[in-house]
Image: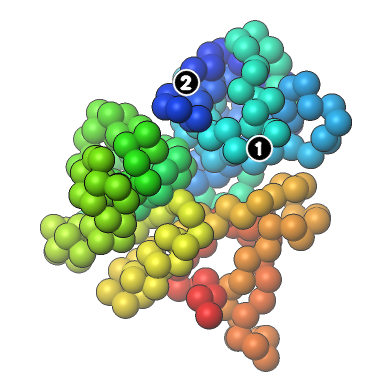
Amino acid sequence: MISDCKIISHEVISRDYRKIRFHAPEICRAAKPGQFVHVQIPSLSDRILRRPFSICDMEDDVLTIVYKIVGVGTARLADAVPGMMCSIMGPLGTFFPEPEEGKIPVLIDGGYGAAATLPIARRWKQKGILLLGARTQDDVLLTEEYKACGYDVRVATQDGSVGTKGLVTELIPGAIADTNGKCVFYSCGPNGMLMAVGKLSLEQNVECYLTLDHQMCCGVGACFACVVKVKSDSSPDGWRYSRSCCEGPVYPAKEVWYA
């Protein structure tokens, strides 16, 4: 669906990170954890393509997205003010499946990838662990929101400014041990991190879902700009291209092609 949504608030979280909230009742009522929306940036008439953003929250008819200013589109979005209207398409894509009874969700995120898994913490009854990786303390986001949801938050930064010094993947063995292996991984972040998480989950025989939200153009599967490699028994090479905007962005780690 496409809805005209009014901006309710727009705030700075940290350095280049922003949180924007829209009144979007129809989208919020249909959305599930892991899905995304495609936003037409205000005052960007010279670039007709929408921009994809993970859904960070969808409670009380309010759609929240968290983003980082990285290019022209997000720089223009950063200028948007409350009261402005945005055309938003969504919710789009696949979503995270809830774990079986007795399994504990372990969320493994990099930077603002934490926005994509926050709906899990807010909506699912079973509480778990957040493993958050970042370059510096400025890239550590939403930890208080996760704690308020009852999550055990563990942080790793590459420069050691917050939490453990190192990569977020170094925190995974501890989470597996603390859950006695009765866990399910849900992960969103940089592609290199996701590949590492996926491979580790297969080695440890842990169920895992990865958000492979590659750069998207159309958002509806027509342009094939956002393809990722997944395993395929019918292909002579053992893999095929999958459109992450409609067949993803959430993929079981066991279906991803790692070669």
Dot 2: what SS? strand
Q: Which residue is drawn at 45% across and 27% down?
A: 15
Q: Residue 90's quadrant in the figure?
A: top right
Q: Residue 139's quadrant in the figure?
A: top left
Q: Residue at x 77, y 47 (%)?
A: 218
Q: Which residue is drawn at 28% across and 29% down?
A: 144
Q: Residue 254's quadrant in the figure?
A: bottom left
Dot 1: what SS? loop
Q: Which colour scheme is used?
A: rainbow
Type of amino acid at the residue the image marks with label 2: Val
Q: Residue 152 carries which label?
A: none
Q: Residue 12 carries which label?
A: 2
Q: Disc 2 and disc 1: Cα gap in Å?
A: 17 Å
Does 10 appear above or below 186? above
* Label 1 environment density (alpha carbons within 10 Å; few <14, some 14–19, many ≥20): few
The residue mark sitting in front, 2 or 1, is 1
The residue carrying mark 1 is 71
Does 30 appear above or below 156? above
Give percent across and percent down for residue 70. 60, 38
Give percent across and percent down for residue 201. 34, 69
**Residue occupying the far top of the picture:** 83
Quadrant for the N terminus, please.
Answer: top right
Residue 100 seen from this side:
no
Residue 158 seen from this side:
yes
Give percent across and percent down for residue 173. 20, 64
* Label 2 environment density (alpha carbons within 10 Å; few <14, some 14–19, many ≥20): some
**Residue occupying the far bottom of the picture:** 236
Q: Which of marks 2 and 1 is nearer the N terminus?
A: 2
